[in-house]
Image (cartoon, rainbow, N blue to C red):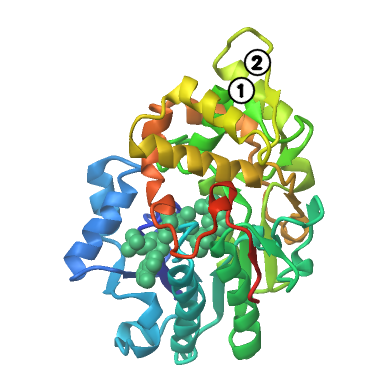
Amino acid sequence: MARILLTGATGLIGGAVLHHVLDRDDGTTWVCLVRCANVEQGRQRIAQRLARFTDAFTAQRLARQVEIVPGDFTCADRDMDPRLDNCTHVLHLAADTSWWGDERVYRTNHDGTLALARRAQAMPSLQRFLHVGTAMICGADAPSLVTETAYPAAEARHIVAYTVSKAATELSLAEHFPDLPVVVARPSIVVGHASLGAAPSSSILWVLRAADALRMLPCAPESHVDIVPADWVARTLVDLLMKPDLKHSLYHLSAGEHGRTSWADVIAAFEKAEPSDGVRRFRRFDLARDRAALRKRFAEVFGLDGSLKQAMLRATRAYYAFCALDLTFTNTRLLDEGFAPAPSLPDYLPVCLANSGEIVEQFADDIEMFTTLPARVPASAEDGLVMAATA
Ligand SMILES: NC(=O)c1ccc[n+]([C@@H]2O[C@H](COP(=O)([O-])OP(=O)(O)OC[C@H]3O[C@@H](n4cnc5c(N)ncnc54)[C@H](OP(=O)(O)O)[C@@H]3O)[C@@H](O)[C@H]2O)c1
């Protein structure tokens, strides 16, 4: 019987994983390592996350099906709780996903993951340690078609400290834990849920909606974005975790060449879901040169009153830096392994828009990612913090 240690259960993808697997009655035990004062509080935190996927009553019922171990994964190597000993699988999702946390992000994501890996070394029945990284470790100078094996790369030019920490983690896992059964999954950009739309999270969806409202793009309409929904990521992670034999130890969880979306198609999908003049004319602008134009347009569309909207303008600029990269992450490994491709964004964007609230409110849901500016952030941080990889 599988006994799966899950970190990050209170997050977006962790919630999608639990929503996907609970109620299956297949004998699997899900053990969730949750930051909380006691088991009941941890259960309530998980129920709260699950309530974004289902009704409150069902969320409570599902949350009762997991084992809770109160704890912090960054101290897992000192956590001798015997409930962790006989885990057969680890699905490590927990991370500090804030963009501007700098040392704190590195300590959590890199040092913390190594602490968890040390704890996993003391799990005698362990069959797989699935570490969730990010495809964006390729940095800003990657070719438009990114393959798994080209990264981590020492010369990668990172846009945010978060991806530096994720790249370094992969290198350190490979270097220091050669005997641990580590598999790395790197999702691309996770937006929405294919059937529940924006309900589980409006993270990053607000960026697409803001770009649409601004009618401004920092790239050509023919360039692409590689976006996948949270429910598909969750399903695929669980399949990767449980498949007895895998051909590789590293996979992109991405839309790939066949599932990626051009900005022209994103715009057409918006026009179809929320018709305007039938054309939806966008202005292309230069992110570095036309800062004032973006600010002016932002003020016209959203206003710039209050710290929330100012933070949203900074976050919009930072995300635009990623949008302009025109990156597609190959998914042939995943498809060759027999996994289903991701639903395409234009197919499920309507359901996301149908249950979306105000764009500014959706950004507020994401604000934790953008609240902490590191002390040594350069003046250009609003365009994305360009860092050399420490990896
Ligand atoms: N979402 C995306 O677009 C995307 C794309 C590529 C890769 N990924 C990767 O996928 C994973 C999950 O992402 P997500 O979007 O679900 O993240 P998320 O919503 O920000 O959730 C992060 C989770 O990590 C937990 N966590 C953070 N620090 C912790 C600690 N010290 N101890 C225990 N738990 C801790 C959080 O717990 P609390 O609730 O206690 O804070 C939360 O459950 C991350 O590794 C991320 O890098 C995400």
**Which residue does the image show at 36% across and 38% down from the upper left?**
308
State the image coordinates of residue 251 (x, y, percent, origin top left). Answer: 69, 64
| Residue 78 drawn above or below residue 138 | below
State the image coordinates of residue 84 (x, y, percent, origin top left). Answer: 36, 83
The Cα–Cα distance between marks 1 and 2, rounded to whole angstroms, is 8 Å
Q: Is mark 1 within 8 Å of ligand 1?
A: no
Mark 2 surroundings: few (<14), some (14-19) or many (≥20) residues within 10 A: some
Q: Nearer the viewer, mark 1 or mark 2?
A: 1
Residue 280, numbered circle: 2
| Residue 247 drawn above or below residue 308 | below
| Residue 59 drawn above or below residue 301 | below
Residue 210 in view, yes or no? yes
**Which residue does the image show at 40% across and 42% down from the upper left?**
200
Ligand 1: image quarter: bottom left
Q: Quadrant of residue 253?
A: bottom right
Furthest residue in direction top, as rendered: 277
State the image coordinates of residue 191 (x, y, percent, origin top left). Answer: 54, 42
Amino acid tagged 2: Arg
The answer to which of marks 1 and 2 sits earlier in the sequence is 1
Amino acid tagged 1: Arg
14 sits to left or right of 70: right
Q: Is mark 2 within 8 Å of ligand 1?
A: no
> Label 1's element?
loop
> Label 2's element?
loop
Mark 1 surroundings: few (<14), some (14-19) or many (≥20) residues within 10 A: some
Q: Which residue is mark 1?
A: 215
Q: Quadrant of residue 185?
A: bottom right
255 sits to left or right of 10: right
Tell me whether circle 1 and circle 2 mark residues in contact (CB < 8 Å).
Answer: yes
